[in-house]
């Protein structure tokens, strides 16, 4: 599998000179294997991916997997050019929203916001709601698990030819499943998924265990997280520690804070690299960048 990053930011796109190295587009990842292309999330990065697909990908069925429906993860969909092409069949998979996934995603294309409604698009679009389950597309096994966020949000595992890729964003590592069940955090998530579907942290570790590549939410520094607990995102140290527990072979820090400039990210990246070098540990942690490709 080849993984390419088309958008790595959280919250809002931040184009400009200060973000040119790591990129300013919101969440979008492309996964390619010998059979097909999968897309995770439709943030603003999906616009450029759509142009690439139309120019170089010979198949007309696209599987788009949404982690959740917060705007930074769906805002690029109206600008994804295959949706305007009658030749394409686009299957949009996402967390169960009690039968409302289609409404949640297409609401941003209501005529008051956008000049073309979903009903008027030329492509065939189908919405498929997922819970914590496993499906197969071709020879790729795709597993899902609810993770800790203010609304229903799915982690994904892609397994193909013995390789495993796991995505955990948006995900707050330091909230406990018991706290969600008791109503201390994320009441909307609890209403949608139900107590029986709130995983323990051990369940999430097992889900990601021994991944060849783990892409994980790491929006905040340790200091920033102190005032943002319950916002649904992890600190960089907590994300790395979680990755170590899963025994992932490579970790990519994702969902970068929009306020973080390139120079800030470079300092963080150098600090992480030097920390593990000082400890004498051969552990691979990367900060995601637009255009970065990793072979799994």
Image: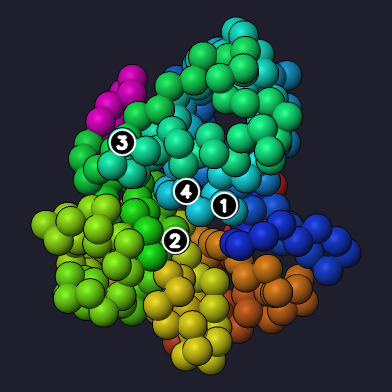
Q: Earlier in the sequence, mark 3 or mark 2?
A: 3
Circle 4 residues within 10 Å: few <14, some 14–19, many ≥20: many
Asked if residue 50 shows in the view, the reply is no
The residue that label 1 is drawn on is: 71
> How far is the residue under mark 3 from the one under mark 2?
21 Å
Span highlighted in magenta in the image: 135-143
> How far is the residue under mark 3 from the one under mark 1?
19 Å
> How far is the residue under mark 1 from the one under mark 4?
6 Å
Give me the residue at 47% from left, 65% from top.
217
Image location of residue 51, percent across then percent down: 73, 27
The residue that label 4 is drawn on is: 69
Give me the residue at 88% from left, 64% from top.
17
* Residue contact between numbered discs 1 and 4, judged by CB atoms under 8 Å: no
Circle 2 — which element?
loop
Circle 3 residues within 10 Å: few <14, some 14–19, many ≥20: few
Which circle, 2 or 1, is nearer the viewer? Answer: 1
Q: Main secondary structure of the magenta part?
A: strand
Image location of residue 146, percent across then percent down: 28, 54
> How far is the residue under mark 4 from the one under mark 3?
13 Å
> How far is the residue under mark 2 from the one under mark 1?
12 Å
The disc label shown at residue 99, or none: 3
Residue 247 picture quarter = bottom left
Give the left or right position of residue 70, taking residue 287 as reference: left
Image location of residue 234, percent across then percent down: 44, 74
* Residue contact between numbered discs 4 and 2, judged by CB atoms under 8 Å: no
Image location of residue 29, percent across then percent down: 55, 44
Circle 4 — which element?
loop
* Residue contact between numbered discs 3 and 2, judged by CB atoms under 8 Å: no
Give the left or right position of residue 100, taking residue 226 as reference: left
Give me the residue at 22% from left, 36% from top.
134
Asked if residue 201 shows in the view, the reply is yes
The residue that label 2 is drawn on is: 170
């Amino acid at each position: 599998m080849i993984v390419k990053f088309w958008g790595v930011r959280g919250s809002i796109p931040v184009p400009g000179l200060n973000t040119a190295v790591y990129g300013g587009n919101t969440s979008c990842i492309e996964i390619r294997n010998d059979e097909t292309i999968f897309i995770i999330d439709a943030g603003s990065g999906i616009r450029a991916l759509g142009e690439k697909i139309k120019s170089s990908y010979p198949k007309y069925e696209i599987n788009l997997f949404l982690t959740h429906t917060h705007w930074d993860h769906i805002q690029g969909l109206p600008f994804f050019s295959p949706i305007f092409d009658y030749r394409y069949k686009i299957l949009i998979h996402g967390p169960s929203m009690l039968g409302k996934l289609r409404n949640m995603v297409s609401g941003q294309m209501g005529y008051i916001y956008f000049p073309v409604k979903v009903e008027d698009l030329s492509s065939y679009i189908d919405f498929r709601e997922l819970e914590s389950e496993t499906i197969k597309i071709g020879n790729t096994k795709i597993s899902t698990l609810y993770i800790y966020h203010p609304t229903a949000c799915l982690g994904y595992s892609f397994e193909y030819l013995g390789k495993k890729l796991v995505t955990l964003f948006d995900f707050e590592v330091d909230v406990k499943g018991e706290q969600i069940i008791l109503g201390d955090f994320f009441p909307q998530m609890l209403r949608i998924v139900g107590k029986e579907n709130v995983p323990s942290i051990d369940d999430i570790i097992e889900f990601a265990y021994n991944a060849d590549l783990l892409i994980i939410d790491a929006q905040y520094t340790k200091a920033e997280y102190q005032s943002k607990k319950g916002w649904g995102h992890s600190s960089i140290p907590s994300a790395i520690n979680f990755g170590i527990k899963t025994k992932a072979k490579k970790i990519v820090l994702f969902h970068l804070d929009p306020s973080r400039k390139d120079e800030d990210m470079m300092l963080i990246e150098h600090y992480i690299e030097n920390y593990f070098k000082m400890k004498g540990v051969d552990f691979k942690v990367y900060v995601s960048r637009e255009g970065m490709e990793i072979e799994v």
